[in-house]
Image (cartoon, helix red, strand yellow):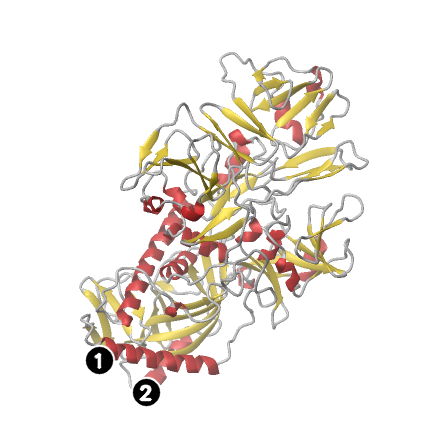
C-alpha cells in the first residue's frame, strides 16, 4: 500500500509533460512586419471566464519605423488548474492606441496589429501570473459558506499511537467458511474471533489483540487459525502477507485510541519540544508532524487540521474554534519558516488569498452528449429511496453512491462533474441543458452539498459546458472578519448508509468526513491530501465500500491521499465526487471519462493548438506560435520597446510605460522620457486617464461581445442557504466594476499620480507572478517536492 501511495505521489509527475508559460514578452513575424507583445494586464476577469485586459505592444512594419502602443482586448479563458495554465481564446481587439502617431498612422498600425492577433488567436498564460494580479488588486468580496466548525475529539500521545476510528456503532460482517467477522466501518483491518470473543488488529506487519475495541491492546503472535483461510480477494491481500505473524520481540506496541465519533490525533515523539518563530510570540512543536503552536503571551495551544484552527489552554483540551480570531503573530510567520505551510490557513495572508482565488477558478469542460450518456451507470441498493434535504423542497437518493436530486417530478444526476436529468430515478439519463436554481439552495449540512459547485449551460453554438470549482472536490471557502481561507470538508457528520440485502456482506456507504483523515493543504499546488500511518491503512473512514455479488468480492476504497492524488484500496478515489484518478485536489472529476467524452480546457486541447498533460510547449515557442523574446539592454537589440525582463506596461491612460532601475519612463515623440513623480502632473494625467477610460467604456457598450461561452452561474443561483451574501454568484470575484477600480496594495508615494500608483501595483503583481510561475514549474519538474507522510 505504501508503494502504491508513492506511485500516485510521484509517478504521475516525474517525466510527465505539461504545458508551461514560457515567459514574456513574445514575438510574432509575418509579411507585414514584427510584433512584440507583453504580458496582458487585467482590467476584469469576470467569473474567471471572460477577460478584459490591456497589452503593451512594440510593432515594426516591414517598411516603416518601429513604434509602441496599447491594445485593449476581450477574450474567453479556460483555466487548467492541474497544470496552472490559462488558455485565452475568442480574441477580440476592442481598440488600440499609438500615442506617438497621427490619426492616419494610428489607423494603419491598428490594422497591422490585427493581422498578428486575429480572432482565432490562442494564447497560453500562467495561471499564477493572473492570480497575482487579482491578489495585488485585493478583490472586494469573496464568496464564503457557513460551515460546521465545532472541534472533533482530539487525542494526544507522546509516543507511537494509532487512531482506530469506527463510524457509529461497530458493524461486523461474517467471513465465509470461517468463524471470523471483520469490522466493516473502520479504517483498519480489524477481525473478531467469535470462538474466543477477541479482536485482532493489523498494524503494518504487527498484530494487536484486545477483548474490546477500546482496549487495552497488546501485541500478539498467536492468531486464530481461520485467518489463514481468508478468501483470495484483493481486499485481504495485505492481511495474508502478514500471516504467519513476525516475532513481536523488541517491537514497539503503539497505543490505540478508539473513537466512534469524528476525531484527530496529535502524536509527539517524546515530550513536546518547541522552537521559536522569529519576531513573533509563537513557538511550534518540532517533534510532531501535526501543526501545533503555543502563543507565549496568551499561553494557549493552537492546532491546525483540515484548514481549521483550534485552541486550548492545554493539550488535553477542551478545544475551541479559533480561525476567526487568531493572534496577529500567525500572519507574521516568515515565508522561509519551517512552519510557513500554515500561512495558507491564516486569514489575511497572501498565501490564504491566493488559495481562496484558486478555489474559485472553474474547471470547464465540453460534454459529448452521446458518449457521456452511454457511460452513466446508476445502481441502487434495492428500490430507489429518497430523503428530504433540510430547508428545501428537494430530496436526494440515499441508497446509491451517486448524487441524485429529485426536483418536483424530475431527477438530476451529478456524475463526475456533469449534470444529467431523467423523468425516472433509474434513467435513462440525458445530458442536462441547465440546472434548476433550487439545487443551489442545498445547505452545507446535506451530504450532497458539493454538487452546488457544479454548473452547466448550453452555449449559443449548442455545446454543453459543465464547470466545477474546488467545492465540488471538498474544499470550501470560509470567511472571517479579517479574510477568507480554504477548508477541507464541511465539518458536518453524515451517518453512513448500510444495506443488508441477499449478500453475505452488508453494503456500507460512508459519506466524506472532515476529520479522521488528517487532511492538510499544500500551498504549492493547491492540493489537499490525507495523512496515513496513525490514521489507518485506509486513510480514515472517508471512502466507500461495496459487495459485488457477481464476483463475491468485498472491497474498500478510502481517502488515503497525497498532495497530487488519493489512493485507496488499490485505486485512487475522491469521496466527494466518487471519481477514481490521481491528480491534484483529490481526484479529477473528468479523467475516467476520456477525452472523447469530456474535453478539458476546451476543444483545441485535442487539435494541438494547446497542450496540457498530454504534451508540452515545444522549445521556446508558445502555443499560439509566438517566439519568446530574449532582450538585451534597456532598448533591446535595437528594437524599440523590447525590454529585457517584460518590464513594459500598458497604462490605463493609453500610454506605454517601462520600469527601469532609475524609475518609470513613458514612450513619446519617438523615444523614452522620464516620468514626473513629483505629483505636479498628477491632475493632468488623471484627467487624461479618465477621458481614455470614458471613451473605452463607451466603445465597450457599443461593441458586441464575441463569445459563445456564457459566464458561470448564468443558469445557476445567485445565492444559497448558508452562504454569506457577498457576491452575486459563487464563482465571481467581481460582478460589476473592474479590476482597475479595486484597492491595491504595496508601497505607494502619496504624491504620485493615480497612474503611477496603478503602474507600481501592476509591476509588483508581475514580479510576484513571475516568481510563482518559476517556482511552480521547478516543483513540477522536480517531482513536486517532499510529500508529507502520515504519522
Residue linked to disc 1: 669
- Dot 1 falls on a residue whose secondary structure is loop
User: Which residue position is annotated with label 2?
Assistant: 103
**Is residue 65 visible to us here?**
yes
- Give SS at disc 2: helix
Residue 367 image position (x, y, % from top left)? 63, 61
Please state if 713 lies on the left or on the right of 501 as rendered. Answer: left
Measured in 3D between alpha carbons, the distance from the residue under mark 1 to the one under mark 2, in whole angstroms, is: 15 Å
**Residue located at (68% from left, 19% from top):** 227
**Residue 726, position in %: x, y?**
49, 62
In percent of width and height, residue 28 lies at: 37, 69
Q: Earlier in the sequence, mark 1 or mark 2?
A: 2
Give the total number of marks visible in the rendering.
2
- Front residue of 225 and 489: 489
> Quick check: can you spot residue 597?
no
Q: Quadrant of residue 573?
A: top right
Circles 1 and 2, Cβ within 8 Å, touching? The answer is no
Instruction: Identify the image quadrant of residue 624.
Output: bottom left
Who is closer to the viewer here, 88 or 132? 132
Measured as percent of width and height from the top left, residue 511 is found at 64, 43
Q: For the point 32% across and 74% down, which residue is it? A: 59
Judge from the rendering whether residue 419 lies leftward or rightward of residue 133; answer left or right.
right
Choose between 112 and 651: the one closer to the eye.
651
Q: In front here: 203 or 589? A: 203
Quadrant position of residue 138: bottom left
Amino acid at each position: 500500500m505504501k508503494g502504491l501511495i508513492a506511485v500516485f505521489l510521484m509517478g504521475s509527475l516525474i517525466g510527465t509533460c505539461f504545458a508551461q508559460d514560457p515567459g514574456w514578452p513574445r514575438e510574432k513575424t509575418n509579411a507585414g512586419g514584427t510584433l512584440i507583445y507583453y504580458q496582458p494586464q487585467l482590467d476584469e476577469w469576470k467569473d474567471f471566464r471572460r477577460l478584459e485586459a490591456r497589452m503593451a505592444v512594440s510593432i515594426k512594419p516591414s517598411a516603416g519605423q518601429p513604434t509602441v502602443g496599447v491594445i485593449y482586448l476581450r477574450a474567453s479563458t479556460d483555466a487548467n488548474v492541474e497544470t496552472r495554465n490559462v488558455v485565452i481564446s475568442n480574441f477580440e481587439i476592442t481598440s488600440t492606441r499609438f500615442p506617438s502617431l497621427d490619426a492616419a498612422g494610428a489607423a494603419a498600425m491598428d490594422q497591422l496589429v490585427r493581422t498578428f492577433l486575429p480572432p482565432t488567436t490562442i494564447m497560453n498564460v500562467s495561471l499564477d501570473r493572473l492570480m497575482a494580479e487579482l491578489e495585488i488588486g485585493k478583490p472586494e468580496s469573496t464568496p464564503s459558506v457557513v460551515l460546521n466548525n465545532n472541534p472533533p475529539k482530539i487525542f494526544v500521545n507522546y509516543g507511537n499511537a494509532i487512531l482506530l476510528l469506527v463510524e457509529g456503532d461497530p458493524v461486523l460482517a461474517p467471513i465465509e467458511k470461517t468463524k471470523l467477522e471483520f469490522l466493516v466501518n473502520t479504517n483498519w483491518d480489524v477481525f473478531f474471533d467469535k470462538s474466543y470473543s477477541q479482536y485482532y488488529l493489523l498494524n503494518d506487519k504487527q498484530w494487536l489483540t484486545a477483548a474490546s475495541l477500546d482496549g487495552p491492546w497488546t501485541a500478539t503472535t498467536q492468531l486464530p487459525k481461520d485467518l489463514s483461510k481468508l478468501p483470495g480477494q484483493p481486499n485481504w491481500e495485505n492481511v495474508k502477507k502478514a500471516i504467519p505473524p513476525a516475532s513481536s520481540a523488541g517491537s514497539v506496541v503503539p497505543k490505540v485510541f478508539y473513537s466512534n465519533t469524528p476525531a484527530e490525533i496529535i502524536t509527539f515523539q517524546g515530550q513536546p519540544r518547541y522552537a521559536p518563530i522569529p519576531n513573533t510570540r509563537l513557538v511550534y512543536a518540532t517533534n510532531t508532524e501535526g501543526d501545533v503552536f503555543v502563543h507565549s503571551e496568551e499561553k494557549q495551544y493552537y492546532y491546525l487540521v483540515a484548514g481549521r484552527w483550534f485552541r486550548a489552554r492545554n493539550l488535553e483540551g477542551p478545544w475551541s474554534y479559533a480561525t476567526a480570531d487568531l493572534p496577529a503573530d500567525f500572519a507574521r510567520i516568515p515565508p522561509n519558516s519551517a512552519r510557513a505551510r500554515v500561512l495558507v490557513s491564516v486569514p489575511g495572508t497572501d498565501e490564504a488569498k491566493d488559495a481562496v482565488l484558486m478555489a474559485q477558478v472553474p474547471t470547464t469542460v465540453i460534454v459529448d452528449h452521446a458518449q457521456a450518456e452511454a457511460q452513466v451507470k446508476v445502481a441502487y441498493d434495492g428500490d430507489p429511496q429518497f430523503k428530504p434535504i433540510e430547508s428545501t423542497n428537494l430530496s436526494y437518493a440515499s441508497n446509491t453512491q451517486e448524487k441524485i436530486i429529485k426536483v418536483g417530478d424530475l431527477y438530476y444526476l451529478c456524475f463526475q462533474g456533469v449534470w444529467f436529468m431523467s423523468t425516472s430515478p433509474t434513467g435513462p439519463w440525458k445530458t442536462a441543458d441547465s440546472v434548476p436554481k433550487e439545487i443551489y439552495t442545498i445547505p452545507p449540512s446535506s451530504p450532497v452539498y458539493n454538487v452546488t459547485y457544479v454548473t452547466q449551460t448550453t452555449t449559443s453554438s449548442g455545446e454543453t459546458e459543465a464547470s466545477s470549482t474546488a467545492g465540488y472536490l471538498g474544499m470550501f471557502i470560509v470567511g472571517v472578519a479579517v479574510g477568507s481561507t480554504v477548508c477541507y470538508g464541511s465539518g458536518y457528520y453524515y451517518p453512513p448508509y448500510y444495506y443488508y440485502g441477499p449478500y453475505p456482506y452488508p453494503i456500507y456507504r460512508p459519506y466524506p468526513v472532515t476529520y479522521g483523515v488528517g487532511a492538510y493543504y499544500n500551498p504549492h499546488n493547491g492540493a489537499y491530501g490525507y495523512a496515513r500511518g496513525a490514521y489507518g491503512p485506509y486513510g480514515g473512514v472517508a471512502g466507500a465500500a461495496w459487495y459485488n455479488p457477481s464476483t463475491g468480492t468485498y472491497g474498500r476504497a478510502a481517502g488515503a491521499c497525497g498532495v497530487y492524488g488519493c489512493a485507496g484500496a488499490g485505486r485512487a478515489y475522491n469521496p466527494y465526487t466518487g471519481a477514481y484518478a490521481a491528480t491534484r485536489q483529490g481526484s479529477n472529476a473528468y479523467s475516467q471519462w476520456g477525452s472523447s467524452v469530456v474535453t478539458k480546457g476546451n476543444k483545441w486541447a485535442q487539435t494541438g493548438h494547446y497542450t496540457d498533460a498530454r504534451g508540452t510547449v515545444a522549445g521556446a515557442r508558445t502555443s499560439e506560435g509566438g517566439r519568446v523574446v530574449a532582450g538585451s539592454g534597456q532598448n533591446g537589440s535595437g528594437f524599440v520597446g523590447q525590454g529585457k525582463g517584460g518590464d513594459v506596461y500598458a497604462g490605463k491612460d493609453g500610454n506605454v510605460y517601462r520600469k527601469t532601475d532609475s524609475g518609470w519612463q513613458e514612450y513619446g515623440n519617438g523615444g523614452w522620457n522620464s516620468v514626473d513623480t513629483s505629483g505636479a502632473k498628477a491632475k493632468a494625467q488623471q484627467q487624461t486617464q479618465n477621458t481614455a477610460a470614458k471613451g473605452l467604456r463607451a466603445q465597450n457598450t457599443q461593441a458586441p461581445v464575441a463569445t459563445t461561452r456564457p459566464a458561470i452561474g448564468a443558469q445557476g443561483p445567485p445565492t444559497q442557504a448558508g452562504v454569506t451574501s457577498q457576491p452575486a454568484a459563487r464563482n465571481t470575484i467581481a460582478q460589476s466594476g473592474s479590476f482597475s477600480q479595486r484597492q491595491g496594495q504595496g508601497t505607494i508615494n502619496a504624491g504620485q499620480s493615480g497612474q503611477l500608483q496603478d503602474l507600481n501595483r501592476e509591476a509588483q503583481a508581475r514580479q510576484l507572478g513571475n516568481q510563482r510561475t518559476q517556482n511552480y514549474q521547478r516543483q513540477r519538474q522536480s517531482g513536486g517536492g517532499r510529500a508529507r507522510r502520515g504519522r
